[in-house]
DNA sequence: CCTTGATCCTCTAGTCGCTAGAGGATGTAG
DNA sequence: CTACATCCTCTAGCGACTAGAGGATCAAGG
């Protein structure tokens, strides 16, 4: 049984964030000491690790809620988890494609800057062009 | 001289967003009709196009403020624009690298899901593993 | 002139996932 | 018994919008 600070260190999730996850219903309200301090068992630490891993992968909290729900009910079909993960993968791929385009354009713009006054600056000029 | 709705259509920026940009000082307060409605001249439309282009490239509003400032003062040195754009490019490259990693891991996870119950689901399992 | 429907106004509050701070209680070590 | 760390709750802030309430104004048709 660990106090919140210990739990934060073990999971790499900050104290206010842990309380926030509790408030958002991702983490069940933990036991408290007589004075009202939260104490966490191993199961909660595991749950936080799950959340952290999913967050690192960029899942939103609503998706994580569903994934935790599945994890809590192992007899349910895995289809929902698959759907969520695939949807997320598609989003990541879209973002990747867009970022690659941005990078190319921005790199081109930056390269064209030869210093000097803003009046002749290709960066400013490129941004001013209405074509996106 | 265009009313705000026309301006929104011409720039592809929504009406509330235009008002928001004005509030944030990116766009100078425009002239008003006697009844208090905003009317925009070509210069403002240009400025909004500039903002939109920069936003599309992922620049933050604070950076855009600086870039607009340079654009307003063509005699100033272009170095700041260059610095902002380079910094942003570096950030984009970092995000790209991270997203590529995520995509790889997520694709691996998704691929390993063979359907069935959540108990045996590789997606859930992968998320539960504490190693990130 | 009157009505209808579109457009506009201001103001407030909500989104997401935290993060920061106030103001106070409790725990632990010397 | 005094420090200092840790914890508590509550509220507000971030960025970049977005949504909605409640009301004023405009243009066109009858």
Image (spheres, coloured by chain):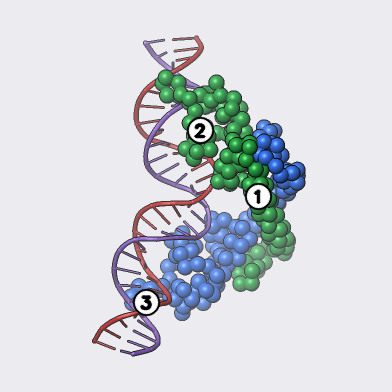
Chain colours: A green, B blue, C red, D purple
The Cα atoms of the two marked residues, 2 and 3, are separated by: 56 Å
**In the visual, does C11 lie left or right of A12?**
left
**Quarter of the rendering occupied by the C terminus of chain B:** top right
Instruction: Give the labeled residue for mark 1.
Output: A83
- Crowd class of label 2 (few under 14; some 14 to 19; many from 20; radius 10 Å): few
Q: Residue at x 41, y 21 (%)?
A: A35
Chain at numbered mark 3: B
- Crowd class of label 3 (few under 14; some 14 to 19; many from 20; radius 10 Å): few
Q: Is residue D30 above or below residue B6?
A: below
Instruction: Give the labeled residue for mark 2.
Output: A28
Give residue B115's position: percent from left, percent from top. Answer: 71, 44
Instruction: Give the labeled residue for mark 3.
Output: B33
Q: Residue at x 55, y 34 (%)?
A: A14
Q: Are marks 1 and 3 on the same chain?
A: no
Chain at numbered mark 1: A
**In the visual, does B96 lie left or right of B5?**
right
| Marks 2 and 1 close (CB-CB < 8 Å) | no
Q: Is residue B7 above or below residue B20?
A: below
């Amino acid at each position: 049984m660990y106090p919140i600070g210990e739990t934060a260190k073990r999971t790499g999730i900050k104290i206010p964030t842990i309380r926030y996850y509790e408030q958002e219903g991702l983490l069940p309200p933990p036991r408290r000491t007589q004075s009202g301090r939260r104490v966490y068992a191993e199961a909660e630490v595991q749950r936080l690790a799950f959340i952290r891993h999913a967050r690192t992968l960029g899942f939103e909290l609503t998706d994580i809620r569903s994934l935790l729900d599945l994890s809590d009910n192992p007899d349910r079909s895995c289809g929902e988890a698959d759907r969520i993960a695939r949807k997320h993968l598609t989003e990541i791929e879209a973002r990747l494609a867009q970022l690659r385009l941005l990078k190319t354009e921005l790199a081109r713009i930056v390269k064209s800057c030869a210093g000097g006054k803003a009046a002749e600056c290709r960066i400013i000029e490129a941004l001013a062009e209405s074509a996106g």
